[in-house]
Image: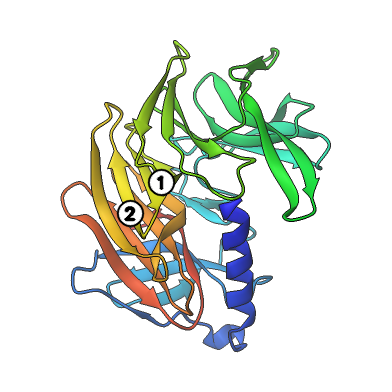
Amino acid sequence: MRVLALLGALIVACTSQPAQSAATQSARASASPNSYSCRLAVISWPSPTAPLAGYLTLPGGTFTVAGDAGSGMYYDRPLNRWVRGGPPALSADGLSYAYSEGDTSSSRLHLLDLRSGVDRVVASGGPWQPVGLDADWVYAMRVEYQDSVAYGQLQIGRGLWKAPVGAGTPVQLTSDARYWAWVANGGAYGAGIMSDVAGAPNDVVRMDLRTLQTTTSLDKHARSRILAVDPHGAAFVMTDGADEELWRVTQSGNAMQVWSGSTSGIRPEQPVALAGSEVWFSSSSLSQAWAIYHYSPLAGLQQVATFTDRPVTVAGPCVV
């Protein structure tokens, strides 16, 4: 549900920005003293209905529109082109993409080969929400939509499933209502119960996809949600309490705080982009200010750019 709230905030922020001509559209950014140097794939949001795919030069913050992006919303570096979306629905090698199409009563789960363009349906029924994929399986939550007088339409988890990339029948892995958010390095990562709209404290778990054994990765007795999981199985978890804290939790369970800040300030958020152990984060904020963050094991988490005229979100790793 947090994702829907963030989308709503993004739409409000976009509609409050002054319109500019295509020739003058730019993202005014300021760079931090320790800025990472590269050309980063991003989406600039001058309005909620006209996102601009392009590249942000760091440091400096110059935005250049990507003329070849088409309808793409994520830059796939292995293929050197823009594709419809990023992780976790994009495979770690950048060659396959999972998505669902349908409505709130049923949907079909697709696997798209990004090199050949072959698009196959791997599961029907659902509705499905893709969680990730590996060489043999496409993973998705089955969800149910329920109407609530207080909260509108709610999305309720109905277990994690896997569908074979070839012919075969989908297999149910769990029957819980947990929000399964990511699949990486042989594990599925889940956070709170989807029906818990009020946001009670929750743990974060990892399920071994071979043994189906579940272990607790992090429990800070706070509302916790997964922002990203790198290809090595390190999860980035945001906890919400008196302050917000971002934790990096290795597959073995070692947790290290990499950021903390006020709940009213700018904070790391999805969408994200992955490049090995490096992670790029977008941001959310209650004010008219946005940022981009970069994490590396050597330098930790750095805020590398800030924006005050429009939202700018991460749409891929560094291009060059």
Residue at disc 1, secondary structure? loop
Residue at disc 2, secondary structure? strand
Q: Which residue is found at the position 27% from the left and 26% from the top? A: 252
Q: Quadrant of residue 224?
A: top left
Is residue 156 toward the left or the right of residue 217 in the image? right
Q: Amino acid at mark 2?
A: Glu
- Res 254 label: none
Q: Position of residue 219 (x, y in %)?
A: 36, 36
Kindly identify which residue carries mark 1: 222
Confirm whether residue 318 shows in the render: no
Q: Quadrant of residue 293?
A: bottom left
Q: Which residue is found at the position 38% from the left and 42% from the top? A: 221
Q: Earlier in the sequence, mark 1 or mark 2?
A: 1
State the residue in front, 150 or 287. Answer: 150
- Res 245 label: 2
Disc 2 residue crowd, few under 14, some 14–19, many 20+, Cα 10 Å: many
Is the image coloured rainbow, by chain, by secondary structure, or in one colour?
rainbow
Q: Quadrant of the C terminus?
A: bottom left
Confirm whether residue 265 shows in the render: yes
Q: Nearer the viewer, mark 1 or mark 2?
A: 1
Q: Position of residue 92 (x, y in %)?
A: 44, 35
Q: Amino acid at mark 1?
A: Ala
| Image: 51 above or below 24 | above
> How far apart are labels 1 and 2 at the CA level?
10 Å
Q: Which residue is found at the position 19% from the left and 74% from the top? A: 33
